Image (tube, rainbow, N blue to C red):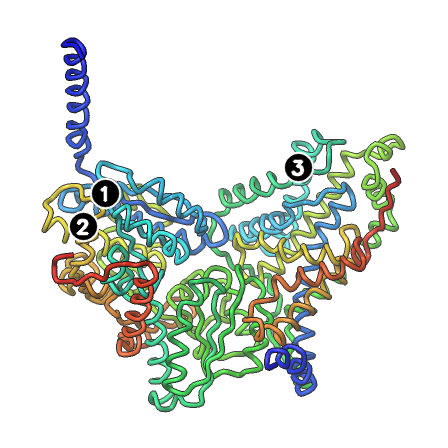
Amino acid sequence: MDTLYAFFVAPFLDIADSPVFFIEVVIGGLSAGVMYSLVALGFVLIFKASGVFNFAQGVLALFAALTLVGFMDWGIPAPIAVLMTAAVMVVLAYAIERLVLRHLVNQEQIILFMSTLGLAYFLEGLGDTLWGSNVKRLDLGIPEASFEIQGVLLNQFELVAAASAATMVAVLAVFFHRTRVGRALRAVADDHQAALSVGIPLKSIWVVVWSVAGLVALVAGIMWGTKSGVQFSLSLIALKALPVLILGGFTSVPGAIVGGLIIGVGEKVAEVYWGPVLGGAIENWFAYVLALGFLLVRPQGLFGEKIIERV
Amino acid sequence: MNLRKLTLMGATSAVFAALFSTAPVVAAEDYMVLPSLVYRTGAYAPNGVPFANGVSDYIALVNARGGVNGIKIKLIECETGYKTDVGVECYEKLKKEGPVGAAVFNPLSTGITYQLIEKTWVDKVPVHSMGYGRTAAADGRVFKWTFNFPTSYWSQASAVIKYIGGQEGGMAKLKGKKIVHVHHNSPYGKEANPTLKILAEKYGFKLTLLPVDHPGQEQKATWLQVRRLRPDWVFMSGWGVMNQVAIKEAAAINYPMDKFIGNWWSSTESDVVPAGGAATGYKGTAFHGAGDSWPAHAAIKKEVHDKGKGAGPREGIGEVLYNRGVINMVYTTEAMRTAMGKFGTKALSGAEVRWGLENLNLTAARLKELGLGGFANPIKISCQDHETNGPVRIQQWDGKKWVFVSEWIVPMADVVRPQIEMAAANYAKEKKIAVRKCDGSD
């Protein structure tokens, strides 16, 4: 009886009793969700353009952050180091297309997925060799102080992260829907051969999309690296993006954002109000439960494309 | 059976006998194998690398000076990535390495230690889980092959509560205080919980346990709960990225850093440097010194690094985890030296090194001789006590370096030891282990 009360009644009484704290939990969830969305966006970009789940996206974020800190450690000013890192990510995209993807055109998607798996391990090893495995501080001067409004705690860094995500989504939305390259990307995603037959240069499209995913990874790497220091566990942030993708859909940029926010809020509320009943540390698995719950209703995710294949 | 067959069998037997009888002679080379289970890669590499470097450099120093009483040590690293299954593979691969097998295993992981405990009974190789692993292993009557000196998670927890009591103006003042234990959601992170619960009951403080899942990159929910609880003190048992994020999250909710104490795996340079100025004032426990101001460090620089044999960057010498690797190897090599006093100067088997560990008496004078005077507390191990209830100190990050802010705090043996003995007795009963008498016969 006590357990039932603790599970079905106490959390709601708690929320009603301290609404300001509940708002704080929701805001905390939204800010965490934005961080997840930053990672999920990179996955969505590659998937939209090639139908491939890019296992290396988390490692791309790590590699970008490592490179950025490495440049800054050489005494290069932060803005120039960011530009140089962006250039490295573009070169990396070119190399990936040239050395990996070009040889796998029209292969099964699982083959492409496996190649990203190998790429992840290669980049992790390369990053370790080039920049070392110690924890590095990343300080781009983003303010990190907290302040209260009406008793609700807000953090400057989290607001900057939210603004970055919003800007990125706006830019990507314009890129996909208003530019020739964006439309070509969507065509390639639908059918490699059909896209080639109408003159869309598949190889350069892949370079473009991996470059954009690399730049998104750079932003994600900066945000997560500032938060936790740049270290190899950064590659594990990909795990936080998976439930977001399941929920938001693998092909939707807005889905990555909305999915991230729902997962963020859901897991924080669950952890704070139901965690103590279940022994705590439930947020990781709860995110997947939440995403799977959505799948039962919408198998394609919130914003994913409904695919009907006739046989 | 005719004469020819008999002759042939006799000759064959003689050849086999000769082959096998000569084996020990061939094997009796004068070096010992010391496996080093490391994690230089993966999510926990920032912690694993400096420790492994400390281990490697100290053994290089010992070898540069001729070895332990002239017997060289062959250090063999095996990469575990802090993964329990891989750690067990390393153990299986290395346990019979060298002329007489591995001398001792230092798993550097509570998870791996738990898996090795029962294997060592069969393989007769000791495990030294220095300040980690199964706390009940402190009872040497049950855990003959496992050692966890100089102190354990339970002793540490009691020392931290003692320190907090002192800061609050006496243990009686703990009544009604709120203490939160933010811990890694793993056997390691949970290890201090039973002791903290007992102490909460004894001293009347309110204890809240907040687990954080691996790897701990996102802790918003945890620290929102801390903000709501407004605890008087936060104690943390974290590892890897969890520590850095926790310190930043604590700063983000404006939690006073001088009321935030990490355990000895949560108070290293890797934990505070990424947080920058926000980490200033953060405290942690320690059972050895920080910095490179001891003569042993100077010797490592001169006799190892200057000769191009250093394992890592020169500036890493003296970091907290580097020093932990050094003190671990001091215990190991001194145990070998002790064992040689009984078994002779030769390559020692695991069983002989176990005896050395159990009879180790590392005095202040000997530490000074080793160039580490005052670096760690003197220690004397016995058959009954494989931990020694060793004292800990509290150190504080001043923004640039760790500084001791307390004297050595002796843990509450009256609370901890009965719990250890009870847990060990339960383990012995469950596993049907004959409890040793410790009268020299076993």
Q: Nearer the viewer, residue A257 or A217?
A: A257
Mark closer to the chain start, 2 or 1: 1
- Dots 3, 1 in contact, CB < 8 A: no
Q: Nearer the viewer, residue A208 or B230?
A: B230
Residue type at tag 3: Ile
Counting other residues with Cα less than 10 Å from the Cα at mark 1, is it few (<14), some (14-19), or many (20 or more)?
many
Which chain hosts label 2? B
Q: Position of residue B348 (x, y in %)?
A: 18, 44
**Disc 3: which residue:** A96
- SS at circle 3: helix
Which quarter of the picture shows residue B373? bottom left
The relative height of residue B249 versus residue B98 in the rendered view (above or below) is below
Counting other residues with Cα less than 10 Å from the Cα at mark 2, is it few (<14), some (14-19), or many (20 or more)?
many
Which chain hosts label 3? A
Q: Position of residue B300 (x, y in %)?
A: 26, 50
The relative height of residue A199 versus residue B4 in the rendered view (above or below) is below
Image quarter where the N terminus of chain A lies is bottom right
Which chain hosts label 1? B
Q: Is residue B426 visible?
A: yes
**Disc 2: which residue:** B336
| Cα distance between the residues tagged 2 and 3 | 52 Å
Q: Position of residue B204 (x, y in %)?
A: 41, 87
State left or right for residue A112 relative to residue B252.
right
For discs 2 and 1, the disc positioned in front in the rendered view: 2
